[in-house]
Image (cartoon, rainbow, N blue to C red):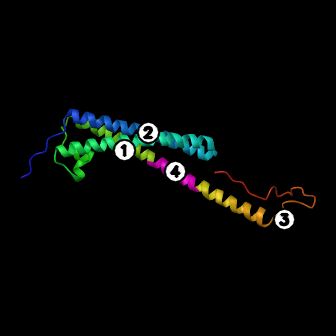
Amino acid sequence: MQKPCALLDFDDCRRLGVLLHEEARHYRRLLRLAVRQNSYMQRQDVDRLASNAREWATYLPRADAARIARERLLNRLAGARDLSGPAASVEGLLEHTDLTARPAVINALREVRHAAARLARQNEQNRILAEFCLDLAREETEIFKRVVLEDPTGCYDDGARNTERGPGGVIVRQA
């Protein structure tokens, strides 16, 4: 017969809740950066995109560190209770939590999931926009190459002035 598992007490739940709130805070910061990144891509603001990328490089390791700290605490708490596999997750540990201590952990877990889901959605939108921008740049490059480099006739009249087609006849579209 398996020995009963010790319950997580208020102190364990408080430490776990603090780490979950910290992780959620970092995800919300990254979400703000992701929203800005989307705006900067739409406006083609290269300087602000570069600045935003530097901020990502600063805050992403902090978010990773918060996640790792939470995972380490979970592993310690689960190990102290001889739990492994899915039982070592936050949800698994909740089954071994004092009923009066659960709400704080549940609320913090909900906060992390909400922030992480919003960040994932924004990152996916940014990925789609970046692909569109790259496709557009490739298309415009091909038009420029074809019209200006391969067939420069029609760009200038006999007096070396631009024709009505404009410089190279390149069509410009914006995202």
Q: Compare marks 4 and 1 and give the one earlier in the sequence.
A: 1
Mark 2 and mark 1: Cα distance apart in space: 11 Å
In the displayed structure, 135 sits above or below 3; it is below
Q: Compare marks 1 and 3 and give the one earlier in the sequence.
A: 1
Q: Which residue is mark 1?
A: 113
Q: Compare marks 2 and 4 and give the one earlier in the sequence.
A: 2
Q: Residues within 10 Å of mark 2 (few under 14, many from 20)?
A: many
Image location (x, y in percent) of residue 64: 39, 44
Q: Is residue 134 visible?
A: yes
User: Going by the image, does 50 lie left or right of 159?
Assistant: left
Mark 1 and mark 3: Cα distance apart in space: 59 Å
Image location (x, y in percent) of residue 126: 53, 50
Q: Which mark is residue 153?
A: 3
Mark 4 and mark 1: Cα distance apart in space: 18 Å
Local SS, label 2: helix
Q: How many marks?
A: 4
Image location (x, y in percent) of residue 102: 23, 38
Q: Which residue is mark 4?
A: 125
Task: Say which residue appears at 10% left-offset and 45% top-offset.
Answer: 4
Local SS, label 3: loop
Q: Amino acid at mark 2?
A: Arg
